[in-house]
Image (cartoon, rainbow, N blue to C red):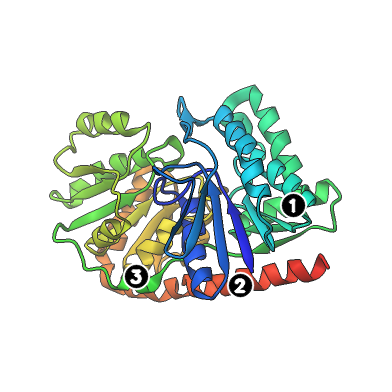
Amino acid sequence: MKIAFVYDVIYPYVKGGAEKRIYELSLSLVKSGHEVHIFGMKYWDGSSVIEKEGVIYHGVCRPKELYVKGRRSFFQAVYFSVFLFFPLLREKFDIIDCQAFPYFPVFTSLLVSVLKKTPLVVTWHEFWGDYWYEYIGFSGVFGKFTERICAVLSKNQIAVSDLTADRLKKRNCLLHNSHQHVCVVPNGVNKIRISDVMPSAESCDILFAGRLIASKNVDLILRSLVLVKNKLPFVKAVIIGDGPEINSLKSLSAKLDISENVSFKGFLEDELLVFSAMKSAKVFVLPSTREGFGIVAIEAMACGISVVTVRSNSNAAASLIKDGEDGIITDPDPESFADGILTAILNEDQMGDKALTAANRYDVSEISKEIVFYYEKVLKSSG
């Protein structure tokens, strides 16, 4: 098959769950003999079309800032969508797989799919619904409306988690689109690449890796660390990542008098360094209340460490964990989270072994077979 993935940002220039999913799937699909193209913003110098590791990348426009005042840029999404049209139109694909967020590229992809008579698949990493009002206030009505429209633009829809699939099905039911089907194809990790990584020489007790944005609730790690420190005075936490919350988090650590216990490492270019840090940690923490999947949790489990996360109606990462076996699920408050961390550290070896076994379910070589099977069904149904 000749497959086109559409998403405005590209791994490893920007590192997040959606980018990583496309990257891992693309490499696996190429190894299986498929031709894979990725359309995104042009983060590199030179030609707009390049090939790396067998994957063909199309840089359709210059990069624009993704976040304005801590929120995804409306202008950037529209800008990318406009410039996407002609590069995507130039080639004929068997499947166009467009990531639902930030929505506007779905409209462009749909137009191309109609003109080229190519099936369009829309992949959902989250479904926000009423969260739009919390995110941008009254203006969220426009975001919510756009999201609803995207939910019915194609009959071929993938969700990366059961949580997102359930929300899509409810929305489709309300809109009376019974012809639509939502297929769950989770994110995958390259277990072979991870297994080859050696542990870092710098060990820690607690590790976090991710974007430092409000919904990640990294401040909960710091507040919990105060309580953990009462039991383990020399506890060491490492925060990997960057984002708009970095300065406030550093200020909070100083205010809580835990600066000596927490280290901010910033953004690490090489993912292998992140895996190395994971293998030298006792527990991985993910206090996010909003995760469409939580691929970083599976990466940590594939490194042989358990994950502590929080209960939330919007945290799909919690569904990846068997509470008390390969990880801990707590309430989103410092006391509960601190207890979860201490329990995970106390049972480090036993829970880590179970986490490693659980990660086998998400090996990308198997996930890529699932998505190919779904693409083949789409092609067959489209005639």
Tell me the quarter of the image containing the C terminus.
bottom right
Q: Which of marks 3 and 1 is in front?
A: 1
Tell me the quarter of the image containing the N terminus.
bottom right
Residue 375, horizontal then vertical, whole percent: 68, 67
Residue at 28% over, 53% down: 207
- Identify the residue position indicated by label 1 in the image: 113
Residue 128 appears in view: no
Identify residue type, mark 2.
Glu
Of the two numbered discs 3 and 2 on the same chain, state the one appearing first in sequence: 3
Evaluate if marks 3 and 1 touch, with contact meaning CB atoms under 8 Å apart.
no
Q: Does dot 2 land on a helix, a strand or a loop? A: helix
Residue 17 appears in view: yes
- 10 Å crowding of disc 3: few (<14), some (14-19), many (20+): few
- Please say if 13 is above or below 26: above
Residue 10, horizontal then vertical, whole percent: 47, 48
- Identify the residue position indicated by label 3 in the image: 193
Front-most of 216 and 273?
A: 273
In this rendering, would 191 be left or right of 199?
A: right
* Image disc number at residue 370: 2
Front-most of 270 and 256?
A: 270
Residue at 36% over, 32% down: 245
- Please say if 370 is above or below 310: below
Q: Nearer the viewer, mark 2 or mark 1?
A: 1
